[in-house]
Amino acid sequence: MKKALIILAIVVSALILLVGGYALYLYVSFSSTADDMHTHIERDSSDFRSDDINFAARDPVSFLLLGLDSDRVDLGRADTMIVATVNPGDQSMKMVSIPRDTNTELVGRGWNDKINHAYYYGGEEMAIDTVEHFLDIPIDYIVTIDMDGFEEMVDAVGGITVDNRLDFEYGGFAFEQGELELSGEEALAYVRMRQDDPLGDSGRNERQQQVIEGVLREGANLTSVTSVGSILDAIGSNIQTNMGFQEMIDMHRYESSRHDLEQLSLSGEHSQLDGVYYYVVDEVEKERVTNTLREHLELEE
């Protein structure tokens, strides 16, 4: 039971929802976590799908994770954007981080802008529509997480271990090259740094994925969680999703998919367009990622 709750706590990414339903089913009698997490969005299903998701048939499913920086809450822009696809048939998951400064069309606005501005202009609905248009795949569910909640969940699993490739200082912490043990506060600073990284957003995306993997590893260790209550509090207070309670329960059939995780990347270059700084994704690379995700979702060509 503890292991299932640990996995639910990993909702730092949309991947967590794969097994979170089972944990919620076990604990719903004393927790309102599912109700606290749920948010309604104005759409029934993705226009990029011909049929609705059938969990009983173990259809592949996709998620969009938006990390909202509480220090920038007045701006309403997503600090982190990650797409995850899950295929229970081959028991695997794929994950790609979208650089927040990526230049693309904002669906519903009629012009190009930074992709993370979609949430600012149109909330969850425009963020989903824009990412679907950008990657040419359906987004079935969205998860938003306050970055302070990210910190709480790292602490809830007892901290994480990462392999740092770059010496740097940020947020009052010094991060030496090599293997590091990070608390929640340290992990948040670790993923926020961007300006001093030669790889910019790409380097930051790499660190975000390292932290997610670190939480996944700790989540597999029964001794890494000492307080079930703190995990539930972190989830209910800081995470919102359009996935319903019954859908969360149904997702327990997908649990084995978490053991095979492949990370994809969107290569590109930094550029100024009309005096504004953007990240321009290479079209060939984007097509490669799109094809990989569409194949993983078992979509028709």
Image (tube, helix red, strand yellow):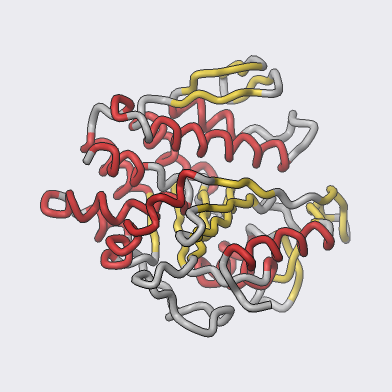
In screen coordinates, is 175 left or right of 214? right
In-front residue for pair 160/155: 160
**Residue 58 falls in which quadrant of the image?**
bottom left
x then y, percent, for residue 27? 17, 49
x then y, percent, for residue 126? 57, 71
**Residue 191 falls in which quadrant of the image?**
top right
When the figure is inspected, residue 201 is found, relative to residue 95, above or below; the finding is above
x then y, percent, for residue 160? 46, 26
In-front residue for pair 140/150: 140
In-front residue for pair 73/200: 200
x then y, percent, for residue 214? 49, 32
When the figure is inspected, residue 161 is found, relative to residue 214, above or below; the finding is above
In screen coordinates, is 243 left or right of 63? left
Q: Which residue is rendered at x = 56% and y = 67% of the image? A: 297
In screen coordinates, is 83 left or right of 289? left
In-front residue for pair 81/245: 245
Numbered marks: total: 0
**Residue 40 falls in which quadrant of the image?**
bottom left
Q: Which residue is rendered at x = 43% and y = 34% of the image? A: 151
Image quadrant in which the N terminus is located = top left
Farthest bottom residue? 50
When the figure is inspected, residue 47 is found, relative to residue 171, above or below; the finding is below
Q: Which residue is rendered at x = 68% and y = 20% of the image? A: 168
Image quadrant in which the C terminus is located = bottom right
